[in-house]
Image (cartoon, rainbow, N blue to C red):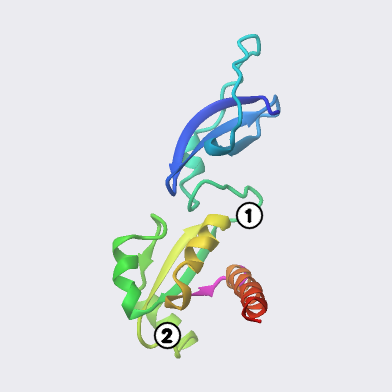
Amino acid sequence: TILIHPYLLKQYNNRWYIIAAAGNDKKILTFALDRIDKVTALPEVKFIPCEQDLSERFADIVGITLCEDRPLEHVVFWVSDSSKDYIITKPIHESQKHMKSNDLDVILKKYPHFKNGDFFSIDCIPNYELIRELCSYGKELIVLEPSSIKDEIFNRISLMLEEYSLARR
């Protein structure tokens, strides 16, 4: 049982969430509505208003999970020719940029083996939804920078490979 002070309803990926403070600590948490078993109104409990602009909370993330301890990252990724039009018309994040001219020259020197396809960047705080979204493109999208996100994806893929290897036996 959790006492919450609800502030905002938000939809992401066809699921509804309530953004609220739990108890009296004013820490903002996210709860999936479809996982809430029972709601009981408590009119005797004084409502604690939110002291921050919640719309800003979602500006630097993909999805609904804000990892407050993680910094904003500049994420550079390559997308294959077969998927680049999809990425262009359905950006991963609102900060997405199609890399061109000077930035592209630097990236091509660093990663010369990525000839076919295009390079993009986003600026956001890494979270579960970002990693899941980047992984959803499979080999058609490769994260090049930063190494922390690249390593996180590599570890996820390595664990998947282990599980699939066991499942094939």
Amino acid at dot 1: Arg
Amino acid at dot 2: Leu
- The reply to whether the magenta stretch includes residue 145 is yes
Vertical side of 65 occupied by 150: above or below = below
Considering every residue shown, the one lying at the far bottom of the view is 113
Vertical side of 129 occupied by 77: above or below = below
Q: Which residues are magenta?
A: 142-148
Considering every residue shown, the one lying at the far top of the view is 44
| Closer to us: 33 or 117 | 33
Which quarter of the rendered picture does the N terminus lie within? top right
Circle 1 Cα neighbour tier, 10 Å, few/some/many (<14 / 14–19 / ≥20)? few
Give the residue at x 32% y 80%: 81
Tell me residue 167's x, y (percent). Answer: 64, 76
Q: In the rendered image, is residue 54 in sight?
A: yes
| Closer to us: 102 or 132 | 132
| Closer to us: 132 or 27 | 132
Say which quarter of the image contains residue 164: bottom right
Quickly name the residue at label 1.
Answer: 70
Q: Does dot 1 land on a helix, a strand or a loop?
A: loop
Q: Which mark is residue 108?
A: 2
Give the residue at x 63% y 47%: 68
Say which quarter of the image contains residue 42: top right
Number of on-image labels? 2
Q: Earlier in the sequence, mark 1 or mark 2?
A: 1
Q: In the rendered image, is residue 125 in sight?
A: no
Give the residue at x 48% y 86%: 111
- The reply to whether the magenta stretch includes residue 149 is no
Tell me residue 23's x, y (percent). Answer: 69, 26
Circle 2 Cα neighbour tier, 10 Å, few/some/many (<14 / 14–19 / ≥20)? few
- Asked if residue 141 lies left or right of residue 146, the reply is left
